[in-house]
Amino acid sequence: MKFYKSLVAAVALLAMVLVAAQSATANPLADPGFELPLVDDGNGVGKWNPFSDSGASISEMATTMPRTGAGHANLDLSAPNGFAGFFQDVINVVPGSPIDWSVWAKDNSGTNGQGIEMRIEYRESAGDTEVSRTGNLVPGSLGSAYEQITLSDTVPAGADIARVVFAIQSFGTAPPQSVFVDDASVSVQQIPEPASIALVGLAGIAVATMRRR
């Protein structure tokens, strides 16, 4: 009887590990609420990396008017032909799987969010090259209250990184522009991390051992 209880427990553990490894619903983004400073080092894994054209353009963490929590992203342009934004890399994505990239944003300058550009850039990690990218999602209008913006797509063949990008630009829309962004999320299937695969293997070994007994 004790053997069967142990076997059932091991099988249950294995099932839980497999479900956790295959889950696509958990938000893989680090700091989705922009509670930490953006880090400009060219590396978008595990953090938000800001970019801008010059000192007249701003991409930073701020605490002026968050939707939730204490922080949010602040993008600001005060000169024409400028741009500012941020990105983060979601690693180990599975080609062929649906992906949803969402943020909550508000216009803080009365331009209705016309300068917004939201996209996904797909990359291949081994060669550190871009495979393809979506077109820019430009909201038709964005008001002074937070609204959710979502870009949906499918991960293409050859890609294992989805670089999610949000930016504003003043090439087609005159400055000043100011957009606040908060509560970002991504939903996509990912290949299990090595640690998760190891746990599955250990659970399988435990089941096989108990069967021999």
Image: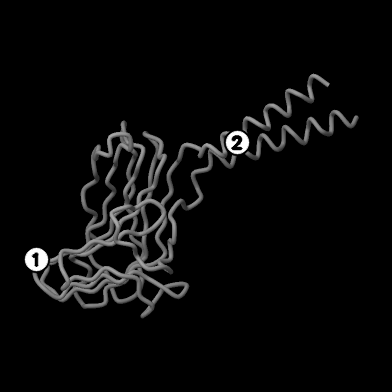
In the rendered image, which quarter is residue 201 located in? top right
Q: In the picture provided, is 11 more to the left or to the right than 195?
A: right
The amino acid beneath tag 1 is: Asn
Q: Are the residues at dot 1 and dot 2 in contact (C-beta closer than 8 Å)? A: no
Residue at 41% x, 36% y: name it. Answer: 94
Can you tell which quarter of the image residue 202 is in?
top right
Instruction: Tell me the quarter of the picture where residue 41 sits.
Output: bottom left
Real-space Cα separation, disc 1 to disc 2, in angstroms: 49 Å
- Seen in the picture, residue 209 relative to 6 is either above or below; the reply is above
Is 198 rendered above or below residue 116?
A: above
Of residue 144 and residue 80, the one placed in the foreground of this image is: 80
Q: Residue 67: image x %, image y %?
A: 42, 73
Crowding near the residue tagged with mark 1, few <14, some 14–19, many ≥20 C-alpha atoms within 10 Å: some
On-image quarter of the C terminus: top right
Task: Give the residue drawn at x 40%, y 37%.
Answer: 97
Where is mark 2, residue-wise?
18
User: Disc 2 marks which amino acid?
Assistant: Leu
- How many numbered circles does the render carry? 2
Mark identifier at residue 81 = 1
Q: Specify the label residue 194 is tagged with.
A: none
Question: At 34% from the left edge and 56% from the top edge, which residue is drawn?
Answer: 150
Residue farthest to the bottom, as pictured: 64
**SS label for mark 1:** loop
Residue reaching furthest top? 212
- Describe the element under mark 2 as helix, strand or loop: helix
Task: Tell me what residue is drawn at x 24 percent, y 44 percent.
Answer: 133
Taking 133 as reference, is 11 left or right? right
Left or right of 177 on screen, residue 87: right
Going from N to C along the chain, the mark reached first, 1 or 2, is: 2
Q: Residues within 10 Å of mark 2 (few under 14, many from 20)?
A: some
